[in-house]
Structures are given as C-alpha cells and as structure tokens.
C-alpha cells in the first residue's frame, strides 16, 4: 500500500482515509474532483470496502460529498456563505480581542504562544484538522476574556458556522498555514508591546481578511 502519514498499525480503511485526505490537502484532488472507488482501490491494492469506509468518513467531515448519478467527489465550498462568515468573524473577533486586552495576563499570552508554536511544528507534516483546532484555541485564548458576553457569544456562533461550512479550510488552502502562524506572531508582538487596542483590532481583522484573499486566489477569483 502507498505510504501515508497514517499512524502505525492503522487499518486499511484508515490508511485509505489518510491517503485521500493528504491529496485533498495538497490540492491534487481539487474541489469537484470525482473519487472513483474502484480506481482508488486498485491503486492502493485494497478492496473497495475500505475505500468506501474512508470516503464515508471524509463525507462526515465535509471534505467529500455525493452527487446523484455522479458519485463521490471532493466537496465544493459554498463560497458566498464561507466568505460572509469569515468577513463577519474578522469584525467580531477583532473587536472581542481588543476589548479583552485589559484582562489578558501572562498566563493567557503564554498559552497563545505555546499554541502557535504547536501550529508551527505542524507545518512540516501538515494536519489541517489539528492545525484548525489549534488555531481556534489560539484565538480563544486572546478573546475569551472579552467583558462583553454578547460579543463573545457572536464570535463563537460564527466559529460554529465556519466549522459547518468547512471543517478545515486549511485542507484546501494549506499554503495559508505558515502565513497564519507568522500573523499570529505579529498579533502577539503588538499585545506584548502594549500597542494601541485599535492597532490590535486591525491586525486581527487583516489576519482574517488575508484568509479570504488566499481562498479567492485558490478559487481563481
């Protein structure tokens, strides 16, 4: 079977899952790409059963979808909903982070730095799901102290919307990951040097908008 980053002792279904997922992450299988189960099974030297199981797992994650009379294909992102959610989150999260600044202590900043270091460590053997989860934790560390509970609730609601639209956008735009880590460093530097809250807010907004720009480049828009 072809080598993947699957854990040692993984089943054929798990190996197949990682094999397909890695090709989606590297954009070898682009949105809309048809996944022919028999062809994949032949290439990997397995039966169709583990391929079907792997594809169903990818479907549950939102990376694969089934279309009538077509079969399995790499999922298409609902572009309008995705862009609207990221633009909304840029505004909300920027404001929530700025309002949190007086409540941010050394513990929160060290936690954010550790999370970003873990994200940096994933860049060589990239796992988009883990990277996305750490990214969420990083931003939470900076805005969960927001004194406005209504704003905090809106931020979390928009994060939930994004996760429904795409469990990990980094599976489709993995080149965005190192840029994101560097921008996190920039945001932390601003906070550490007591920058004006407006500058911190704008940095968080720019961070989100650059994700939109990366996605549009990926889509050719």
Image (cartoon, rainbow, N blue to C red):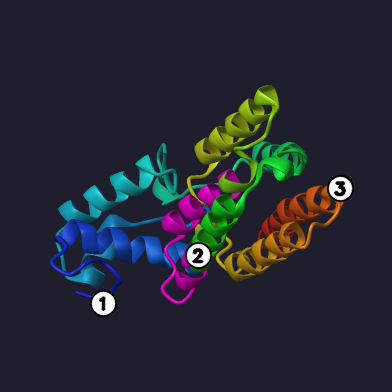
Q: Position of residue 127 (x, y in %)?
A: 42, 63
Disc 3 is placed on an element classified as helix
Q: Which residue is mark 3?
A: 198
Q: CA distance from mark 2 to mark 1?
A: 24 Å
Q: For mark 2, does the 10 Å Cα neighbourhood hold few (<14), some (14 to 19), or many (20 or more) residues? A: many
Q: Position of residue 61 (x, y in %)?
A: 39, 44
Disc 1 is placed on an element classified as loop
Can residue 117 be found in the magenta stretch?
A: no
Task: Choose between 220 and 21: the one closer to the eye.
Answer: 21
Q: Residue furthest top?
A: 150
**Is 159 placed above or below 11 here?**
above
Q: Which of the marked residues, 3 or 2, is nearer the chain's N terminus?
A: 2
Q: Which of the marked residues, 1 or 3, is nearer the chain's N terminus?
A: 1
Q: Which residue is mark 2?
A: 119
Q: How many marks?
A: 3
Task: Choose between 68 and 84: the one closer to the eye.
Answer: 84
Q: Which residues are magenta?
A: 118-140
Q: Main secondary structure of the magenta part?
A: helix
- Seen at 44% across and 43% down, the residue is 62
Q: Which of the marked residues, 2 or 1, is nearer the chain's N terminus?
A: 1
Q: Which residue is mark 1?
A: 3
- Seen at 83% across and 57% down, the residue is 195
Mark 3 in CB contact with mark 2 (< 8 angstroms):
no
Q: CA distance from mark 3 to mark 2?
A: 26 Å
Is residue 97 visible in the rendered image? The answer is: no
Task: Choose between 31 and 215: the one closer to the eye.
Answer: 215
């Amino acid at each position: 079977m072809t080598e993947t980053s699957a854990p040692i002792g993984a089943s054929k279904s798990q190996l197949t899952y990682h094999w397909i997922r890695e090709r989606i992450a590297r954009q070898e299988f682009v949105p809309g790409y048809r996944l022919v189960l028999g062809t994949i099974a032949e290439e990997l030297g397995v039966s169709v059963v583990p391929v079907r199981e792997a594809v169903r797992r990818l479907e549950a994650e939102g990376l694969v979808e089934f279309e009538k009379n077509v079969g399995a294909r790499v999922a298409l992102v609902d572009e309008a909903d995705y862009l609207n959610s990221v633009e909304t989150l840029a505004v909300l999260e920027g404001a929530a982070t700025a309002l949190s600044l007086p409540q941010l202590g050394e513990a929160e900043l060290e936690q954010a730095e550790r999370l970003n270091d873990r994200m940096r460590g994933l860049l060589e053997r990239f796992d988009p799901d883990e990277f996305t989860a750490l990214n969420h934790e990083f931003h939470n560390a900076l805005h969960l102290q927001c004194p406005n509970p209504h704003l905090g609730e809106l931020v979390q609601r928009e994060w939930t919307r994004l996760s429904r639209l795409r469990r990990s956008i980094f599976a489709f735009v993995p080149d965005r990951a190192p840029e994101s880590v560097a921008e996190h460093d920039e945001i932390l530097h601003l906070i550490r040097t007591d920058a004006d809250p407006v500058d911190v807010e704008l940095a968080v907004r720019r961070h989100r908008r650059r994700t939109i720009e990366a996605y549009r480049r990926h889509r050719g828009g």
